[in-house]
Image: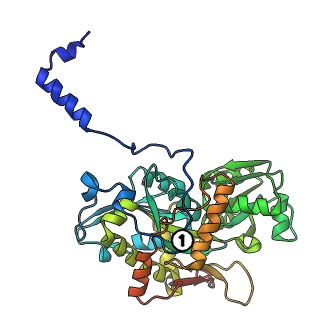
Amino acid sequence: MCHPLLRRISRPLIVSLLCLLAACRSDSPAGAAPPTSEAKAPAATNEPAAPTAAATGTGGEGAAKYGKPGEPIHLVVGYQPYYSEAWSGIVVNGLGLWKKHLPPGSTVEFQVGLQGSIIVNAMLADKQQIGYLGDTPAIVAATKRSVADLRIVAHIGSSQDQCNVFFVRNDAPEFASPKEAIRWLHGKTVAVPKGSCTDRFARAVFAQEKVEPGAYLNQNVELITSGFRAKKLDAAVIWEPTGSRLASEGLARRVASGKDVNESDAAFIDMRADLIEQRPDVVTGWLRAELEAEQFLADPNNSREVARMAKEQTTGFEERVLWQAIYGRRSNGAEPELRLSLPFAFGAASLEHIRRATAFLHEIQSIDVAELPADAVVPRFAEEVQRERGAKQPVGVVYAQNDPYTK
């Protein structure tokens, strides 16, 4: 029986509506969840190819999605002011460096992600085009091509204690060594933001030291902070600057980092492949701003300015604590203490870190491929910008400094 509403619609209009519905299609809903299994990707190489229209699905009607080279563009950028290894994003935002390098009339909206997985989901849903990410979310994002094609375009941070820090409750025993502290976690309640660079690090160390926590909780940085305050956690593995805040507020004790077990962490920039293909001018412009930001971050004369910008773009942190997270001393040794390296482009060490992290994530069943696709890393833009500016790799390094807030 015909619905009463349809009786009121003319036959020609019904025919037009049916034709319109037949012509429309939706290959992948913007909010679709990532698939649970994918085919094994080809082995990665040191010279990945740039994305093509066939690979990105940007041909036809969607080809002008971002406009033509040279035209103004609106970008939505996911960044992490609560993750110090990716603080070049804070500098790009705080100094407005993008305004110098994107086409005149362009606009940028910076959206805060409390952890990288939030940014990845937004990029997969085509709500963000550029993301500042830790190594795990950056790699995971590059394996979700049946949802959206995301590529790794710059290596913006490398360290051993920016995303790799163990904390224990204040009444835990005094340990003779960092490894003893890690082994104490066997059978204990440990929290970590799962899907993060911290999660990868914690799992790698537990496997290495044959430690099996009694409970391995998925908690964000806010829950971990409140968990220590309420004395509900034995330990947590967390990144900076939350680590420095836990210590400054006396909520937990720092007992180990990646330096103690020779495990590195890293941060990267991912971009949507359709943006890379359609607007190479925007990719180059953004990376020019990024290079300036990394060099600014590495200049010791700018450390307080960086901390000030970080305070403006976060809540609940004191400026001195933010400064301590990336510039503060962690040892009393006489030798210069490296806190952060800023590679920018992809050297052999960068590609090896991605390879090893990818293999480990596959081993623990976080991703379905043991190797990234050969074109998952797109190095040519960063290489061109670095060469254009005459910069050497790394483009900057951050060494520990004396506390300028001490009178």
Screen quadrant of the N terminus: top left
* Residue farthest toward the front in the current orientation of the protein: 42
Query: Callout 1: helix, strand or loop?
Result: loop
Q: Is residue 187 above or below residue 324?
A: above
Q: Residue at x 58, y 79 (%)?
A: 348
User: Looking at the image, can residue 278 be seen?
Assistant: yes
**Amino acid under disc 1:** Thr
| Place of residue 123 in the rendered image (x, y in percent of width and height, measured from the top left) | 43, 55
* Residue farthest toward the top in the current orientation of the protein: 1
| Place of residue 88 in the rendered image (x, y in percent of width and height, measured from the top left) | 48, 73
- Locate residue 225: give its quadrant: bottom right
- Locate residue 351: give its quadrant: bottom right
Screen quadrant of the C terminus: bottom right
Query: What crowding class fits label 1: few (fewer than 14 Cα within 10 Å), some (14-19), or many (20 or more)?
Result: some
Q: Which residue is mark 1?
A: 45
| Place of residue 137 in the rendered image (x, y in percent of width and height, measured from the top left) | 55, 59
Q: Is residue 403 left or right of residue 215?
A: left
State how many labels appear. 1
- Locate residue 20: give its quadrant: top left
Q: Residue at x 64, y 58 (%)?
A: 361
Viewer-proximal residue among 194 and 399: 194
Viewer-proximal residue among 218 and 16: 16
Q: Is residue 33 left or right of residue 367?
A: left
| Place of residue 65 in the rendered image (x, y in percent of width and height, measured from the top left) | 27, 57
User: Looking at the image, can residue 316 be seen?
Assistant: no
Q: Is residue 221 left or right of residue 138?
A: right
Viewer-proximal residue among 212 and 215: 212
Q: Residue at x 44, y 74 (%)?
A: 91
Viewer-proximal residue among 362 and 89: 362
